[in-house]
């Protein structure tokens, strides 16, 4: 079983590096690097959710091979995971076994935000980002790092905040939704994820804000849940070489 993990806005594949040690040996971690950051820093940024999801889906197709797989995303990564999963459904026999979404309310509902962040001036934008957690204020002291990080983060937020939902049939596979109990932006819309699966939609709360997954204690709890979910796949329940449940 392969687990593809998609980072949040401004993040790189490296945010999932510590997961590998705690995942079950039968689960192969495959962190997806989005264009324009990390190991793909030389590539242009994607400018819309369609480009991001096509890129993610193409890499999943290539890396998954014939193995069964699941997809995890946090915040913007949840949007990309959701859209990529719909693209993968178009590949006969290549649907994910499971979708894990984290730090994002149901995609058909607007987040409960007070304002849009991406149009703000640099200083105001970064102050708003710091308030959300997940980004150290020390970034402001390193102008070179900030000059690289700010355009990536702003573009990611623009994609997330201007996302337009398109109605499609629910997924035929199960969804697990993880969320922080103090995430005021996304918490109200979390239960509505059930609309997007014809199977089971499981909700799991963690004490903390939007970036609860960066807490080492919660990270361990999340990986225990992922291990249990993906290790519960009966050997006969996956058609060989397709990723389909039978």
Image (cartoon, rainbow, N blue to C red):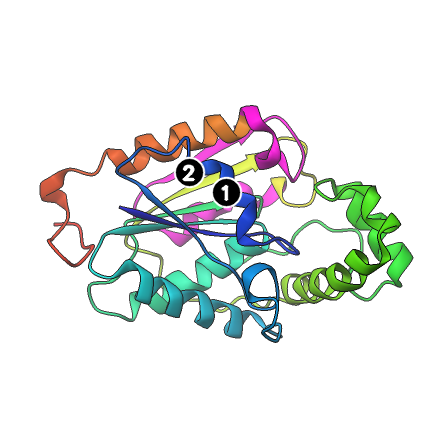
Residue 205 located within the stretch drawn in magenta: yes
Q: Position of residue 61 (x, y in %)?
A: 31, 66
User: Quarter-wise, where is residue 223 in the image?
Assistant: top left
**Secondary structure under the numbered disc 2 in the rendered image:** loop
Quadrant position of residue 43: bottom right
First to last magenta residue range: 188-217
The residue identified by callout 1 is: 17
**Image point (74%, 51%), residue name:** 113
Residue 107 seen in the figure: no
Q: Please state the horizontal and vertical placement of residue 40, each as a whole percent of the image.
A: 55, 66
Rendering coords of residue 221 (x, y %)? 47, 26
Helix, strand or loop at label 1? It is helix
In this view, the residue in front, 84 or 186, is 84
On screen, residue 219 above or below 37: above
Residue at the disc numbered 2: 20
**Residue at position x 79%, y 51% from top?**
114
- Position of residue 111 in the picture relative to residue 192 (left or right): right
* Pointer 2 local density, CA inside 10 Å: few below 14, some 14–19, many at least 20: some
Nearer the observer, 47 or 17: 17
Residue 125 picture location, percent across and down: 84, 56
Identify the residue at horizontal 20%, vertical 59% (top origin).
66
Describe residue 246's horizontal placement relative to residue 73 as left or right: left
In the rendered image, which quarter is residue 188 located in? top right
- Res 122 seen here: yes
Residue ID at (52%, 31%): 219
Disc 2 to disc 1: CB gap under 8 Å: yes
How many numbered marks are there? 2
Residue 11 in the image: above or below residue 20: below
Q: Mark 1: give few (<14), some (14-19) or many (20+) Cα within 10 Å.
A: few
């Amino acid at each position: 079983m392969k687990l593809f993990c998609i980072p949040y806005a401004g993040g790189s594949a490296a945010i999932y590096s510590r997961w590998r040690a705690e995942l079950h040996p039968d689960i192969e971690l495959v962190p997806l690097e989005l264009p324009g950051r990390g190991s793909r820093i030389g590539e242009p940024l994607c400018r819309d959710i369609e480009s991001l999801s096509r890129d993610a889906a193409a890499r999943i197709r290539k890396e998954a091979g014939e193995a069964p797989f699941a997809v995890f995303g946090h915040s913007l990564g949840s949007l990309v995971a959701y859209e990529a999963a719909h693209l993968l459904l178009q590949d006969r026999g290549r649907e994910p076994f499971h979708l894990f979404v984290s730090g994002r309310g149901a995609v058909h509902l607007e987040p409960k935000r007070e304002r849009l962040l991406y149009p703000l001036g640099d200083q105001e934008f970064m102050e708003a980002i710091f308030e959300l957690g997940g980004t150290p204020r020390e970034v402001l002291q390193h102008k070179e790092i900030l000059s690289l990080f700010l355009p990536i983060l702003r573009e990611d937020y623009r994609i997330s905040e201007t996302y337009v939902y398109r109605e499609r049939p629910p997924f035929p596979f199960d969804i697990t939704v993880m969320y922080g109990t103090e995430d005021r932006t996304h918490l109200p819309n979390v239960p509505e994820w059930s609309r997007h699966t014809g199977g089971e939609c499981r909700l799991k709360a963690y004490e903390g804000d939007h970036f609860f997954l960066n807490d080492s204690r919660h990270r361990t709890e999340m990986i225990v849940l992922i291990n249990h979910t993906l290790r519960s796949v009966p050997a006969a329940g996956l058609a060989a070489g397709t990723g389909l449940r039978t």
